[in-house]
Amino acid sequence: MKKIDKAAYQERLDRITAIFKDMMAHATEQATYRCPYKNRFDECTARFGCRNQRKPREAGGLLVCGGDDKLDYRSAWETDEAPRERAEAGGPDQDAPNLNTGNTTDPAGGSVTDGTTTQPSVIGKSIFDYADDLAVQVPTSCFRNGICHECIVEIQEGMEGLVPRTKPESFLRENYRLACQARVIDPKVDIAFSPLRRTPKILTVTEEKETPLDPMVTRRGDAVFYDDEQVDQFRGHLYGLAIDLGTTTVVMDFVDLETGKSVHVCSFENPQRFGGSDVMHRISYDGSFEGELWNAIINAVNHEIMDWCERTGTARQEIYEIVVAGNATMRDLFFRLDVQSIGQKPYKSLIENEYLAGERETTALTIGTRRLGLRANPKARVYGLPLIASHVGGDVAADLATVELAAQPGVSMLVDVGTNTEVVVAGNGRMITASCPAGPAFEGGGIQYGMPGYEGAIETLKWEDGRFAWSTIGDTTAQGICGSGLIDLLAELRRHGMMSPKGVYADRKQFEVPVVPESGITLSRQDASNLAQAKAANYCGQYIVLRTFGVAPGDVDRLFLAGGFANYVDVRNAIDIGFLAPVPEDRIVKVGNAAVQGAREILLSRSRRAELEALVKDIEHIELETTPDFFEVFVEACQFKPMPGVLV
């Protein structure tokens, strides 16, 4: 028997081991690029649920894979779900009660409505089914099996008429449900619902400015570069995306990086509303249900990207950079960061704390789109505009870029009105800022007949001939009152002696004032109280920042009003009730959505980006509640009367 050469044997063994190791490494790498369950027609053959599954091309066909071959598919697999089997069976979710869907409507039964159209209530029918019938757009990417958490709706009335929350809905609170899980259980109950991703009247653009064309993304021949790194071969276009990420609304501007021109603008209500109407509630919510708010906004942005791509025949891989302007909470939620420190004194984000500790050179952020799950080029970057301090974030930084506040002569003032109102006063090389937690009252929150700027909202109002004359968005029947209409209403009540500065009606026994009697729309004392407190927050921010800077309202040479809401406000009425500082009206300039314009400019110019990052480092920040006489100022600010011209 031939003697075995141990050295040769070990060499062959090592060679085989290396081959198998390479095979395993190759298989692992391939799993991150091509799902083994996807066939050559891009259809899913798996018998379990996956976040990438989409509606089949034809009835009875396989689900279509929506993955992009650039993300690790394994993180999308949900092995405890079987959506196709359940869809084939046609039954409800397995966690839901067994409902008799054959039951027809009861003549004396209830109804289901989206606020515009109504249908009879039927046992077993889901809110998603009604959305289909009523032509209401409700997003989904999981074939309605409760996995994607995109189809969140607000149940405005009749929660008791629906089945209890199922397991996939465990992250929701109050009157929010998943449309695919919420099924009718009591047909005698009237149910009203609305989707979270609605399209209100949002100011999407401001006046475009000439911006030096020097983007981070450039083309050299057929090669595409991000800064000096080649990231792709030219596919036909270089696109970027500027996003104004507001607490209430979101605006997206698709920009051609080679021409600097906007090619498409879209807007929608921020779908994170189920986590609360203001940043403090969302911070609390994210602490309990980590990742749900991030998932909601990323899905919404991806939906708009893919919708634009499908309608224009654009490849999403042609999007090479995304610039996000948002306050500290909104921006960091988008970047999937822990936001708990922003909700606690001294109200600073993790990024700001790292910057103050010398661990970062800037509060701006840059990260790859793949890490955030955004549908763009796999090597695209996401840039978050720098934070200024505390709650004063990247949206205000974008405003500053748009109006070039630091370069304005004399004393200039910026007021960006929103759920959080930010104030900046600048002059003689100095800038001071503060954030005012105004809350959602002037966007319809907490006001019985208040509503955001949707069709049917009263946007202007005047007292004429013993009654209110009004106009609505879309010139339709009045359904409620939006922010600009509420300011008009308060000013007219004061102007005609129907309300005292303290919000008390002329008839002290009167609880509410009829606004549109035929529609039952009123303004109650409680509504007036909520509006007074929201107005007071705006007042305090402007008053204290001006006083700290050492100027009176009459000394301000230019007041820039930013934000979609501010664009529609009657300036005279806003000054008369103390919503705005009494700066002479001819010095007030409405600049529209300055945040998205600023994000666009930063997208197009690396030099402007560097200048902005340097500028925000020198801005002084005031925490309003630490001002010694803050409470006294706030109490005075709660009255519906103008701010004094002399600040003491």
Image: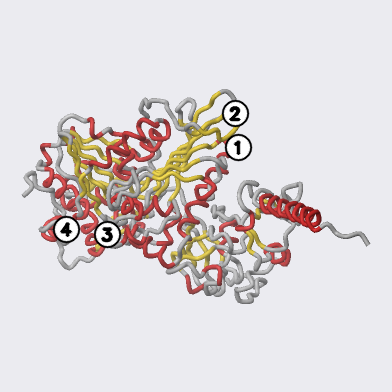
Which residue is at the far top?
221
Whichever of callouts 3 and 1 sits on the residue coming sooner in the sequence is 1
Q: Secondary structure at mark 4?
A: helix
The answer to whether marks 1 and 2 mark residues whose Cβ atoms lie closer than 8 Å is: yes
Single out the mark in the foreground, 3 or 2: 2
- Residue for point 50% across, 70% down: 170
Q: Is 414 left or right of 98, judged from the image as shown?
A: left
Q: Secondary structure at mark 1?
A: loop
Q: Please tell me how many numbered marks the rendered image carries.
A: 4
Q: Residues within 10 Å of mark 2 (few under 14, many from 20)?
A: few
Amino acid bearing label 1: Ala
- Give residue 107's quadrant in the image: bottom right
Q: Residues within 10 Å of mark 4 (few under 14, many from 20)?
A: few
Q: Position of residue 88 (x, y in %)?
A: 73, 64
Single out the mark in the foreground, 3 or 1: 1
* Disc number placed over residue 236 in the picture, else none: 2
Q: Secondary structure at mark 2?
A: loop
Q: Secondary structure at mark 3?
A: strand
Task: Name the residue carrying label 4.
Answer: 626
The answer to whether marks 4 and 2 mark residues whose Cβ atoms lie closer than 8 Å is: no
Task: Name the residue carrying label 1.
Answer: 315
- Give residue 448's quadrant in the image: bottom left
Q: Residues within 10 Å of mark 3 (few under 14, many from 20)?
A: many
Most foreground residue, 504 or 338: 338
Whichever of callouts 1 and 2 sits on the residue coming sooner in the sequence is 2
Quick check: can you spot residue 485?
Answer: no
Most foreground residue, 74 or 572: 74
Amino acid bearing label 3: Leu
